[in-house]
Image (cartoon, grey):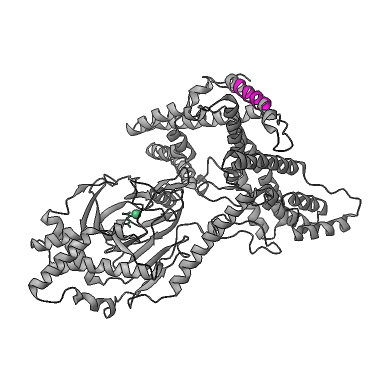
Amino acid sequence: TSPGRLVPFDLLYADGVRAYLARDWARAAELLQRALHSYAGLRAARRACRAACAREEPFPGGPGGWEAALLGPVLQRAGCLQRCLGRRLRPAPSAHRASRAVRRDFERREPYNYLQVAFFQLKKLDQAVSAAHTFFVANPQHLQMREDIEKYRRMSGVKSDSFRDLEATPHWEAYETGVQHYDADEYLQAVARLEESLSEALSALEECRALCEGPWEDEDEEEKMQPGLYEAIAAHYIQVLKCRQQCILEIATKPGRISATEDFIPSHLDLLQFAYSQVGNQTLAAECAASYLLFYPMDEPTLEKMKQYRTELGEDAAVAARQSIQHYVQRSLMEKKLIYYAVEHLGETFNDPDLWTPDELIPENLKEKHREDQEKQKQETLDVEERGKRGPLPFEGIAVTMDSQQMNGTQRVVFDRVLTESECKDLLRLTKAAGEAGDGYRARRSPHTPHERFEGLTVLKAMQLAQNGDVEWRDARLLLQASEKSRKIIESYFTPGKKLHFSFTHLVCRTAVDGEQEGRMDLSHPVHADNCLLDPEGQECWKEPPAYVYRDYSGILYLNDDFQGGGLFFTEMDSVTVTAEVHPKCGRLVAFSSGKENPHGVWAVSRGRRCAVALWYTHSQEHAEQERVKAEELMKQRAVEQDQPDGDKHEGTDRSSRSSSEPRAPSRGTKPADQRQRPGSDRKQHPKVLRARDEF
Ligand SMILES: O=C(O)CCC(=O)C(=O)O
Ligand SMILES: [Fe+2]
């Protein structure tokens, strides 16, 4: 077929966004739709070319001497794809090279975010709703969109079937209905849907693999700079193999989720095997069992069933694994072998996405490291939970409202009743007075968002203001005391016996700027980790300056709740999958380890003023907060001048005064319930089906 002209999607997108900003809704809607269409066209061209050049290159049998054997086929295939894409794409493939940022926007379905607004403005409600829904499926943490969706749901003109996912992956739809049927013992329907899901998943896998083949329109120049042709090709080849291996993650991860459903393909076979046996089709049940054994040849229950099927079907009935699965497993094993060879000998790294990889394939030293990592993580989780149970909190009346487990993470906790209502009032008064004094509390243009004013006061500044008579001494002192109390609580909870020093203490308020809240999409505080630089793309967190690398624990002591928005939330390393939420209120202290295990952010404060004492602690004496030492000196000086013992005035509040309001456990993390559950764990006779990757 002759190529249709595809205007590069990034150009259309840029024009669409420009039209959007100019509030030219009709043009914006048209351009954005065309951008999506072009993007889909590009993917389709890649898919078709991959199929056209699909001869699987003959893999050399083993690692020894594979280098020479692979050069020819790789070059051939690259050439074939290049020519094919050249024929199919007008303008040439290089014109479709979009920036990383734009590609990311498309991966995250950002164009639908704009589209829904444009359609809404155009009064095309049905299309607005499906665009909103499509975006929301991939961005379930998006607060604004969640509100919009709820608004749509309440609108009388909106039908429930308008909530369509325009980018729905067919295998996920089929899989989910299949599992529903399965759980409802409706095995006939389950079989139909799971077969559909399996075959869709396998072809999605092919498409994903095709995108790994290159030539990549977006290839970074530096990646091309290799010492020589031979090295370049070897490196390229390993990249392709690794990319192909990662495809299973893409397929097994539902849009909007971070973690893949582990062992996606084998799980299908396991479910199908059981479902077929329930509907009396022993032949297909046996075929699924045989296919499953390709992944787990030593799986006792399946071997057992295999025997059963053989007797039922008669010894001479031919029972073989499915061709498609044989192909999948063989190819995957060969790829893994080559990758692991490169890992051992060429210093490559590889994150194997599969659980079923046979042990003998993994190099010995890697196995060890893998085991160690797992052990370490397990130990850390245990340590923390243990400690939480052990030492009593150093103050009475404080409650642990949520622990790590309830917050779907590690080293996270929420305490309540750390301050009384009257103490919160005093500290809030301190922020007001400091603001009025105009010193140490300058309204700084917000570092995080133009829609909010961000103001902060340090302990030393508070003391200096007290000296000047701008604020009350006792309020300034309360700031020192409240932060010390929090320190003791956090130290005893997380690191008993190991001293935690203050690293930085900051009384901060975030105030919504009037009249700038309409349609706000940003956060009050973008997602970050406190002691490293989060790289959501790379799933890494760089522990290097300008991050405050020496911070070990973070705490936030909240003072009020009379504002709108402003919830604190935790995410996975991807910085988009929300795993827990904390609603600020007077006396609530949230504490967590400052590392990559706890990325967090703050939802937009859309009305009012949200105040809290932000606290960071360190094990490192040399990074102890110097300002605090000075502040305490000022405090002592003042006590001497007044000839009264310092500090202990408020001690009573630690023990005697209790807040009247009972702490209520915040009811929900935002992680969708079905992400937490372990599909199949309670499934009859099926101990080993799906495991969500993020469970522990
Ligand atoms: O105020 C909050 O709830 C969190 C603030 C925060 O994460 C920070 O300042 O690093
Ligand atoms: Fe933070």
Specify whether 520 is left or right of 407.
left
For the N terminus, the quadrant is: top right
Horizontally, residue 465 falls left or right of residue 617, namely left
| Res. 667 in view | yes
Percent across and percent down for residue 53 are 67, 26
- Residue 76 among magenta residues: yes
Whereabouts is ligand 1, in terms of quadrant?
bottom left
Majority secondary structure of magenta residues: helix
Does residue 67 sit above or below 473 in this rendering?
above
Residue 434, by quadrant, is bottom left
Res 505 quadrant in image: bottom left
Identify whether 28 is placed above or below 329. above
Q: Position of residue 548 (x, y in %)?
A: 33, 51
Instruction: Determine the residue positioned at 27% across, 63% down.
Output: 560
* Residue 358 position within the rendered picture, expressed as x and y whole percent measured from the top left: 69, 50
Q: How many marks?
A: 0
Find the magenta span and give its range: 72-83
State the image coordinates of residue 621 (x, y, percent, origin top left). Answer: 31, 61
Quadrant, the C terminus: bottom right
Q: Nearer the viewer, residue 90 or 332?
A: 332
Q: Is residue 320 toward the left or the right of residue 454 in the image?
A: right
**Up-down: is 245 above or below 2?**
below
View extreme (bottom): residue: 656
Question: From where the camera sits, is residue 665 visible?
Answer: no
**Left or right placement of residue 548 versus residue 350 in this view:** left
Rendered residue at 57%/27% (across/down): 215
Q: Is residue 445 inside the magenta stretch?
A: no
Q: Does 695 sit above or below residue 339?
A: below
